[in-house]
Image: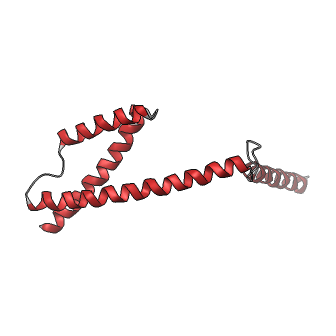
């Protein structure tokens, strides 16, 4: 009887693990992976994402120039009034695109944080 219980428990464990693997590999929605409309839109998103990253890279290269200027002229990296202006403008522009102020604020805070990191790094190298 003890052997039967162990075998039964082992069977249940295997069955449970099999069902977990199956559940994870079966999509919840029944959209086929080769759906042409879905695939086309995903290709568009990938292209847009690539452009977004390129634009962020371009922005941060300008930030480096500003960081060099600020380091040479002993100007602090954080310019709170300037960031407030940028944030207000981008929130308004985001509204025109149907984006929430919360999303734009979080996005611009992340971008600003990276910009400050770059400027501080430049300032530290100059010392």
Q: Is residue 84 left or right of residue 92?
A: left
- Is 52 in front, or is 33? 52
Screen quadrant of the C terminus:
bottom left
Residue lying at the far left in this picture: please name it. Answer: 73
Q: Position of residue 117 (x, y in %)?
A: 26, 56
Q: Which residue occupies the foreground of this view, 62 or 28? A: 62
Q: Residue at x 62, y 48 (%)?
A: 41
Where in the figure is residue 92, as x and y percent of width and height?
35, 32
Residue at (27%, 40%) from the top-left corner?
86
Residue 43 position in % (x across, y down)? 61, 54
Which residue is rendered at x = 73% and y = 43% of the image?
Answer: 28
Give above or below for 72 relative to 111. below
Give the number of marks. Answer: 0
8 left or right, relative to 56: right
For this rendering, which residue is in front, 80 or 93? 93
On screen, residue 65 above or below 87? below
In front of the other: 8 or 127: 127
Q: Quadrant of residue 83?
A: top left
Colour scheme of this structure image?
A: secondary structure
Query: Whole-percent x and y of residue 11?
Result: 85, 54
In the displayed structure image, the side of residue 99 where residue 89 appears, left or right:
left
Left or right: where 95 falls relative to 64: right
């Amino acid at each position: 009887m003890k052997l039967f219980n162990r075998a039964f428990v082992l069977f249940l464990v295997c069955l449970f693990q099999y069902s977990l693997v199956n559940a994870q590999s079966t999509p919840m929605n029944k959209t086929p992976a080769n759906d042409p409309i879905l695939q086309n839109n995903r290709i568009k998103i990938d292209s847009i994402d690539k452009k977004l990253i390129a634009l962020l890279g371009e922005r941060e290269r300008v930030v480096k120039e500003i960081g060099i200027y600020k380091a040479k002229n002993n100007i602090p990296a954080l310019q709170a009034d300037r960031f407030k202006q940028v944030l207000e403008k981008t929130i308004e522009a985001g509204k025109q695109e149907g984006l929430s102020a919360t999303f734009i604020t979080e996005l611009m805070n992340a971008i600003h944080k990276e910009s400050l990191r770059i400027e501080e790094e430049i300032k530290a190298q100059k010392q």
